[in-house]
Image (spheres, rainbow, N blue to C red):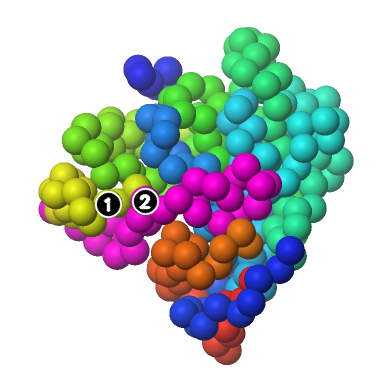
Amino acid sequence: MESQIPDTAEPVDALTTTQSATGAGSRILAVANQKGGVGKTTTAVNLATALAATHKKVLIIDLDPQGNASTGLGVERVARQETTYNLLIGDAHIADVITPTMVPGLSVAPSSVDLSGAELELIDAPRREYRLKSVLAEVSNDFDYILIDCPPALGLLTLNAFCAAHSVLVPLQCEFYALEGLSHLVKTVNRIKRAFNSELEIQGVVLTMYDRRNNLSDMVAADVRNHFGDKVYETVIPRNVRVSEAPSYGKPVLLYDWRCAGSQAYIHLASEVLKQEGSHGSERKLSV
């Protein structure tokens, strides 16, 4: 797509973490890829769950009109009276939109299909690309991490996310055209960094839907690591049926089946993210 932008589980012992060095205010990560079906929402939901399990206060901003992150966290569509659509057009206060989830320490600002019309409604609005940034400033001291689940497009909604974020985390499916799409996204991030948000950077690339039985997965992983080096996380998210099943039960996979390979992968990804953020302090075991 062309860019338009100038039930609790048992303790898990696989990861020890430390308090993140986010400093004053939240660390804001945009989870983005212009291609759909790459595990973007799955990564946002389960990474947020894993971070919350380390006693971080985490907020997910569901900026995708499909609202899958909200559904995956158990927020029914009929319960979404105020959504991110209302936030962007200025009809609601963020405190009225934030909704607690079944995961202790994890909240969500849910989305609805109305958000699909926001780009047209905001086309003539002043500072339209900074609407989300202004809203998140109101709660920047209330959360350690804010993860923005972006739509699979490089339009005004994603531009708002990139203008509000400190960095972009890119889920990348292990498939043939993956590298081409990633190169396009990197160019977009660089354009936004120059024009709108000088702090923006690529946080990292996480390889998703990896199938060890498929030689193509290994080839894609090697190619991406060759091009982007240490920007690619060591953790690889495998294809896993439990990960696919969890959203239909309105749960992150870490609550649905914490023992499965997918859950363990997201736990290790959270560990990498925290270490990358310069974690410090007394170590704590991850539990969900």
Secondary structure type for disc 1: loop
Q: Is residue 152 above or below residue 69?
A: above
* Residue at mark 1: 211
Q: Disc number at residue 239?
A: 2
Q: Position of residue 148 (x, y in %)?
A: 57, 43
- Which residue shows up at 49% across the image and 52% down it? 243
Q: Visible in this render: residue 165? A: no
Residue 245 belongs to the span the image colors magenta: yes
Q: Which residues are magenta?
A: 226-253
Residue 58 belongs to the span the image colors magenta: no
Q: Position of residue 249 (x, y in %)?
A: 66, 47
The image quadrant where one finds the C terminus is bottom right
The foreground one among 282 and 21 is: 282
- Which residue shows up at 84% across the image and 35% down it? 79
The foreground one among 59 and 22 is: 59
- Which residue shows up at 70% across the image and 19% down it? 114
Q: Disc number at residue 37?
A: none
Secondary structure type for disc 2: loop
Horizontal side of 34 relative to 63 (left or right) equals left
Location of residue 262 (image quadrant): bottom left
Q: Position of residue 284 (x, y in %)?
A: 58, 85
